[in-house]
């Protein structure tokens, strides 16, 4: 019985990380209709940033988070200007999604191999004084870095929820999503809104990268694996349903760890794929989707 | 197809068919040509789905790797190679069912992310299942001849081009193009869009599986079989198809030639870093020449003659 509880606890910890990984991806996809397949690569880039901040200057990864966020925000803005903003000229949303899929898929190769050149393909992870320590709660062990990751994920998700629903900037984003032309007629600077939300999305990837490097490890080509987790979480939550991303990630983590008890570690990704396929067959609008009127 | 085109084709086929029989053209050239043919098959496979049907496949490697793996094992079991290769193609088709049926009912995006996830899962699962190096028994190695590989690759490449030609000129091909241009309009007109997409995916997966079979015939041993599922095998054919011109018959062929020449220039000097250049080139082409080499030439010609300007503006 204890092993089941332990597996569930681990599932929750890794699930929160899945949610965090998917958050920026879902923001770009659900709100702006850019499918960013390079999201996993940006996660790795953020991981490298916090790794080097610790290695070179000895800044703790959880303390260096603001620096990583600012740096990744700027990278996101540059990325938007160079790669994504030309897509706004395309005539319809479908073409925008398809073309952004292709462009970001090309960017994966540029970024991945640049990172390999700069920092070698070695697997890296962060060792701090608290790495590997655990906290015992109700007979179940939680790793400290994992708990820190959950805390960061929940805080970031709440902050994003507040920004999207409580501020004028969030209103601008939602208005631009619904109808870009009407929004700009109402005096919203759609270009700037998109620019900032892309920056936020990539900054979220940076946050996820920090958590990944503090409780797991990174290597220059590992981004693709995290990306497929992000896909599965987004499908579970439903496209455009950003508030459900963290719960959906935790659900995926729980399902995976339940599956791992039965079939073994090497098939973890296969479980995620099966979940993905089942959800698409039964409820393609996502498990957490709200009921729409009239349907 | 008039006589002029047919005779050009005949000459081309003779150019590729005859020389290896008459004189020894060197292992490196033969290897290069075989890789060119494999890229042509893969690029045509991607083209059928991405260029004609408008469904972007980001997991071609899954079908390719599946073809390689199945062909390798069935051929090793003593089945004649041609049957083993066919089995590889069929296995890739079965794999396509897994991802095609749930995702193709939905918007195009889900097919892209579904195939991407499929390739990634295949890579990890295959990597954790087959730890050891896979190799053929020594009798297979003793009877190895590169020329026979060359002919198999050539025949399959020609077959791929012919299949794509026939499919795109059939009713199914019209349906596929209709799905690409406007899926809702196609549905309203009475096209069974789901059936069109699934059939296109089956043919595309079959071709990719056959390419995998050719690769299994070329390489008798694999240090890491999961490398066959690496996303590079998606990216390079995709790049060949897009640079040449997606949605045209000869585009992927020209793109593959271009790609093989480019990798000869860069891959030897730069190693893995050549993918940085490929990535940049690919992004630039998608942004500024979305119709590729063939499409751009066609457009320039139209612009010069002034005919069809209005039609070409839409697509």
Image (cartoon, helix red, strand yellow):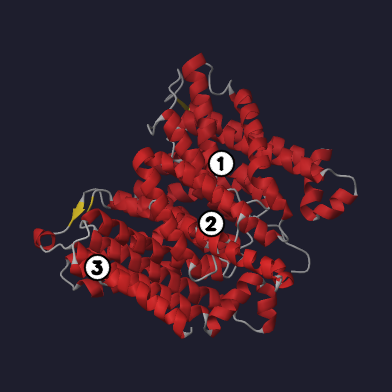
Q: Residue at x 48, y 69 (%)?
A: B250
Decide which of A254, A4 is in the foreground and name it. Answer: A254
Q: CA distance from mark 3 to mark 1?
A: 55 Å
Between tags 3 and 1, which lies in front? 3
Ranked by sequence position, the earlier of labels 3 and 2 is: 3
Q: Is residue B50 above or below residue A87?
A: below
Asked whether the viewer can see residue A217, the reply is: no
Name the residue beneath numbered marker 3: B19
**Quarter the C terminus of chain B occupies:** bottom right
Residue A110 is situated, as x and y percent measured from the top left of the image, at 50, 41
Drawn side of residue A154 relative to residue B166, left or right: right
Residue A286 is situated, as x and y percent measured from the top left of the image, at 62, 58
Element marked by disc 3: helix
Q: Is residue A188 above or below residue B139?
A: above
Total number of numbered discs in the rendering = 3
Name the residue beneath numbered marker 1: A21
Q: Chain of mark 2?
A: B
Q: Residue at x 62, y 23 (%)?
A: A67
Q: Residue at x 51, y 14 (%)?
A: A57
Check chain identity for marks 1 and 2: say if they share one: no
Drawn side of residue B105 relative to residue B215, left or right: right
Element marked by disc 2: helix
Other residues around mark 2 within 10 Å, as few (<14) / some (14–19) / many (≥20): many
Decide which of B79, B286 is in the foreground and name it. Answer: B286
Name the residue beneath numbered marker 2: B113
Q: CA distance from mark 1 to mark 2?
A: 16 Å
Residue A295 is situated, as x and y percent measured from the top left of the image, at 74, 69
Drawn side of residue A94 relative to residue B113, left or right: right
Looking at the rendering, which quadrant does residue A220 occupy? top left
């Amino acid at each position: 019985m204890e092993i089941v509880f332990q597996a569930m606890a681990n599932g929750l910890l890794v699930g929160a990380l899945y949610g965090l990984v998917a958050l920026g991806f879902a923001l770009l996809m659900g709100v702006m209709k850019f499918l960013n397949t390079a999201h996993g690569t940006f996660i790795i880039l953020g991981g490298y940033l916090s790794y080097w901040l610790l290695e070179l200057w000895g800044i703790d990864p959880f303390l260096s988070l603001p620096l990583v966020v600012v740096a990744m925000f700027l990278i996101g803005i540059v990325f938007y200007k160079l790669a994504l903003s030309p897509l706004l000229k395309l005539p319809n949303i479908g073409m925008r999604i398809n073309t952004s899929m292709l462009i970001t898929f090309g960017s994966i190769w540029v970024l991945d191999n640049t990172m390999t050149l700069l920092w070698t393909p070695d697997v890296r992870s962060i060792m701090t004084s608290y790495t590997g320590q655990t906290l015992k709660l109700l007979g179940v062990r939680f790793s400290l870095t994992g708990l820190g990751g959950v805390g960061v994920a929940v805080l970031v998700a709440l902050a994003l929820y507040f920004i999207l629903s409580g501020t004028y900037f969030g209103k601008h984003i939602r208005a631009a999503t619904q109808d870009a032309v009407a929004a700009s007629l109402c005096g919203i600077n759609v270009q700037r809104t998109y620019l900032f939300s892309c920056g936020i999305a990539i900054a979220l990837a940076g946050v996820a990268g920090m958590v990944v490097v503090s409780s797991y490890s990174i290597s220059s080509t590992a981004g693709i694996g995290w990306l497929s987790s992000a896909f599965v979480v987004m499908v579970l939550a439903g496209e455009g349903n950003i508030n459900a991303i963290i719960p959906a990630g935790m659900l995926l983590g729980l399902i995976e760890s339940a599956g791992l008890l039965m079939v073994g570690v090497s098939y973890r990704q296969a479980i995620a794929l099966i979940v993905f396929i089942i959800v698409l067959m039964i409820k393609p609008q996502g498990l957490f989707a709200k009921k729409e009127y009239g349907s | 197809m008039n006589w002029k085109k047919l005779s050009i084709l005949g000459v081309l086929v003779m150019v590729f068919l005859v020389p290896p029989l008459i004189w020894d053209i060197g292992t490196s050239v033969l290897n290069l040509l075989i890789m060119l043919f494999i890229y042509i098959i893969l690029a045509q496979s991607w083209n059928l789905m991405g260029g004609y049907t408008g469904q972007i496949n980001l997991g071609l490697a899954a079908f390719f790797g599946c073809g390689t793996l199945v062909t390798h094992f069935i051929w090793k079991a003593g089945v004649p190679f041609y049957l083993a290769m066919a089995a590889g193609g069929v296995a890739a088709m079965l794999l396509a069912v897994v991802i095609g049926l749930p995702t193709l009912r939905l918007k195009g995006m889900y097919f892209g992310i579904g195939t991407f996830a499929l390739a990634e899962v295949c890579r990890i699962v295959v990597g954790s299942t087959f730890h050891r190096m896979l190799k053929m028994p020594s009798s297979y190695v003793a009877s190895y001849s590169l020329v026979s590989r060359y002919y198999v690759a050539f025949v399959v490449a020609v077959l791929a081009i012919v299949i794509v030609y026939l499919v795109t000129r059939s009713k199914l091909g019209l349906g596929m193009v209709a799905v690409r241009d406007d899926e809702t309009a196609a549905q309203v007109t009475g096209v069974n869009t789901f059936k069109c997409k699934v059939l296109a995916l089956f043919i595309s997966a079959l071709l990719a599986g056959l390419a995998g079979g050719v690769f299994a015939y070329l390489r008798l041993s694999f240090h890491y079989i999961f490398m066959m599922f690496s996303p590079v095998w998606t990216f390079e054919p995709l790049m060949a198809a897009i640079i040449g011109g997606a949605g045209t018959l000869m585009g992927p062929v020209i793109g593959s030639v271009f790609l093989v020449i480019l990798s000869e220039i860069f891959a030897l000097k730069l190693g893995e870093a050549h993918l940085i250049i490929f990535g940049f080139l690919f992004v630039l082409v998608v942004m500024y020449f979305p119709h590729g080499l063939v499409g751009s030439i066609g457009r320039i010609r139209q612009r010069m003659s002034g005919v069809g300007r209005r039609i070409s503006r839409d697509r």
